Structure formats: C-alpha cells, structure tokens
Image: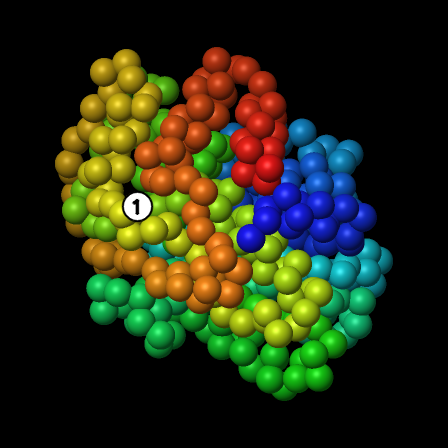
C-alpha cells in the first residue's frame, strides 16, 4: 500500500462526499482538497457547535451543498449538476445514545439515506466507484466481530440495514461492473476537532479545557480506537483500487491492531498523560442504555488484499489528537496542524 499514490490519484477527480460537515467528513474533505480533487459535499449543517468544518479552511475550496440525505429530489439534482466519478457516503446519524432518543430519524437517515444515494448512483453512469462507510457495530456482537449482520441498538441495526441495502443494489443493478461498490466498517475514531456528545475523547477534551476531572461512564469497555486519518486513508485506498479494477470491490473492516484495542480507562489514562497539567478522571456510570462491552475488528481482508497496516498505535493517535486540541485551546493555527498530520499520513 503506497498512500502517496493514493493521494496523488485524486488530483482532478470529481468526488462527492456525503456527510462532509461532520468530523470524519471534514477531515476527508480537507484531504481531498489538498490532493487537488474537485470536491462536492452534501450534508446537513455542521452537527456540533463549535464545528470542525467551520475552522478547517474549506470555504471557497470545495462545493459545499447543505441538504438532507433523505431528500431524494435534491440529491438527484446535485448528482446531475456535479457528475461525480467517485462517491464516498459518510452521511449518517452516528450516535448510539441519540438513536435511542429518536429511532425513526435514525432509520430514515441511515437506511433510506443509503437507498437514496444508491439510487442516484444507479441513475448516473458517471459514477465509477461508490463506497458506503458503516461501522464496526453492524455485527451481531458476541464479544467479537463475527460475520453476521445484526446490530443491537437502533443506530447499529440501522447501519446493518444500510449494508444490506448496499448488497442488494450491488447485486440487482451493478452486476455488470459499470460501477464498483464497496462498504467499509470502521472502529472508533479519534482525532482533533471532534466535538460530538457522548464520545469519550471529546468528553476528555472538554474536561481538560475546563480544568475539571474527566467523567468516565464505562471504563472497562474495550474498543478498537484509531486515529481518524487511518480509516479515511483506507476508504480512499479502496475507492481508488476499485475505480481502477472492479475486482477490489467488496466489504472491508478497518481497525487497529489487537494491541491497540484498549479499555476506555486505559485510553483516558493515555489522554491524561499526553495532556499533562495534572488531568485526572472519575468513574461514574450513569446507567445509560445498552452498549457492547467488547468490540474488536478482524481486518485481515484489508491487510491481505492491499498490504494495509495501521500507521499509528493508540498512544500515537492520542498524541496527534492532543496536539490538535491544544493548538485549538490557544487559538492557534489548527488548519496547519491538520495539513501537517495529513501530509505525514500520505507521505
């Protein structure tokens, strides 16, 4: 796997990114802009305040369309106007706890949103490569990622449905190979600029900046943590490979090595050490809704097919995250930090 070649491939390509105003979508948009792609984003307004998208230096450098993935008419219009060659589908309701609060919206967005984007791909032969980004939580969880789609909570189950929709469209409408279709299931991503609620690293950052102890609700749960640039590089690698040769279309897990699947308590310890200033944490379970205690991904297919391997361990990922966040805390140049981290990943 040569990530410099992956980066260079996107120069001049017409790329549509759904969910571009979110955390991962913003980082992906910045990568593509830096690579010289013609980027169109389709998404709701940024989901957090503050928002990484507003500070990522993308204004005027990409075509940012504010729209709802549930709005098929608007989505069709954007496809017809921009004629994308590559479509990267990240738009989703991504928070487990929010899916319990509003399951209907979660299913509408994550299931029918996928139907809508695939319908647009079906109707527009300009698209040669489509990648649906789902989650490690699509599996029926038996304390391991087994090869059976299910998903316990409305978020996880809706993403399982999104996968099944993708499989159906692929077999029904793309069997001739005119557009290559893949899905990628990623683990828990961390990195600078994530301001979401109910995520442990943003909670750590908010506590650190407020100079208060971090509240940890489930310190013994194990998660496959990885820096945000790891799965994004993998998405771009898969989308490029299948654009060039449809034999690479498939279903891939993207996660860290086993040694970097750590408990939440261990992760927070690393964060406290990296941040410094005497930061500490407290264990306070809030009796919230069901979440799996143990998640780990089998990424052997990605490794075998592409020679892929993670660039950063979890400790390095925390270090990169803290670097961005401390630059943000002092009102520094966070775009320069993003660009430096992107350049290091794709060198």
The residue lying toward the viewer, choosing from 120 and 278, is 278
In the image, residue 190 above or below residue 289: above
Identify residue for label 1: 260
Q: Position of residue 97 (x, y in %)?
A: 34, 53
Instruction: Give the structural element (helix, strand or loop) at label 1.
Output: helix
The residue lying toward the viewer, choosing from 278 and 214, is 278
In the image, residue 295 above or below residue 319: below
In the image, residue 78 above or below residue 282: below
Asked whether the viewer can see residue 40, the reply is no
Name the residue rendered at 48%, 26% in the picture: 324
- The quarter holding residue 156 reads bottom left
Q: Is 217 left, or right, of 271 in this rendering? A: left
Name the residue rendered at 76%, 61% in the picture: 85
Q: Is 183 left, or right, of 156 in this rendering? A: right
Q: Position of residue 216 (x, y in %)?
A: 22, 37
Name the residue rendered at 59%, 69% in the picture: 248
Asked whether the viewer can see residue 153, the reply is yes
Q: Position of residue 229 (x, y in %)?
A: 51, 42
Residue located farthest toward the right when viewing the structure as drawn: 81
Tally the numbered discs.
1
- The quarter holding residue 18 reads bottom right
Mark 1 residue crowding within 10 angstroms, few (<14) / some (14–19) / many (20+):
many
Name the residue rendered at 62%, 74% in the picture: 247
Q: Position of residue 330 (x, y in %)?
A: 48, 13
Q: Quick one: quadrant of the C terminus?
A: top right
Q: How is the image coloured?
A: rainbow
The residue lying toward the viewer, choosing from 336 and 257, is 257
């Amino acid at each position: 796997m040569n990530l410099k070649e992956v980066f260079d491939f996107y120069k001049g390509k017409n790329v549509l990114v759904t969910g571009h105003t979110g955390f991962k979508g913003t980082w992906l948009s910045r990568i593509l802009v830096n690579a010289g792609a013609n980027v169109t984003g389709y998404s709701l307004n940024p989901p957090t305040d503050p928002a990484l998208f507003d500070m990522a230096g993308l204004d005027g450098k990409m075509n940012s369309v504010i729209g709802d993935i549930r709005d098929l008419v608007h989505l069709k219009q954007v496809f017809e106007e921009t004629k994308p060659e590559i479509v990267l589908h990240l738009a989703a309701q991504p928070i487990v706890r929010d899916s319990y609060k509003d399951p209907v919206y979660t299913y509408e967005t994550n299931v029918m949103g996928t139907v809508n984007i695939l319908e647009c791909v079906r109707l527009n032969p300009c698209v040669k490569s489509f990648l649906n980004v789902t989650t490690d939580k699509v599996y029926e969880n038996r304390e391991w990622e087994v090869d059976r789609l299910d998903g316990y909570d409305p978020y996880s189950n809706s993403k399982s449905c999104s996968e099944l929709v993708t499989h159906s469209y692929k077999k029904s409408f793309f069997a001739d190979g005119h557009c290559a279709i893949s899905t990628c299931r990623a683990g828990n991503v961390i990195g600078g600029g994530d301001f979401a609620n109910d995520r442990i690293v943003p909670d750590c950052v908010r506590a650190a900046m407020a100079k208060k102890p971090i509240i940890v609700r489930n310190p013994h749960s194990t998660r496959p943590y990885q820096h945000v640039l790891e799965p994004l590089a993998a998405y771009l690698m898969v989308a490029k490979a299948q654009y060039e040769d449809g034999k690479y279309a498939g279903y891939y897990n993207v996660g860290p090595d086993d040694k970097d699947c750590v408990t939440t308590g261990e992760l927070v310890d690393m964060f406290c050490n990296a941040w410094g200033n005497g930061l500490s944490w407290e264990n306070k379970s809030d009796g919230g809704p069901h979440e799996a205690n143990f998640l780990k991904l089998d990424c052997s297919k990605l490794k075998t097919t592409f020679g892929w391997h993670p660039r950063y361990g979890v400790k390095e990922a925390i270090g990169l995250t803290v670097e961005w966040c401390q630059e943000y805390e002092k009102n520094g140049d966070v775009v320069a930090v993003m660009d430096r981290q992107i350049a290091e990943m794709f060198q």
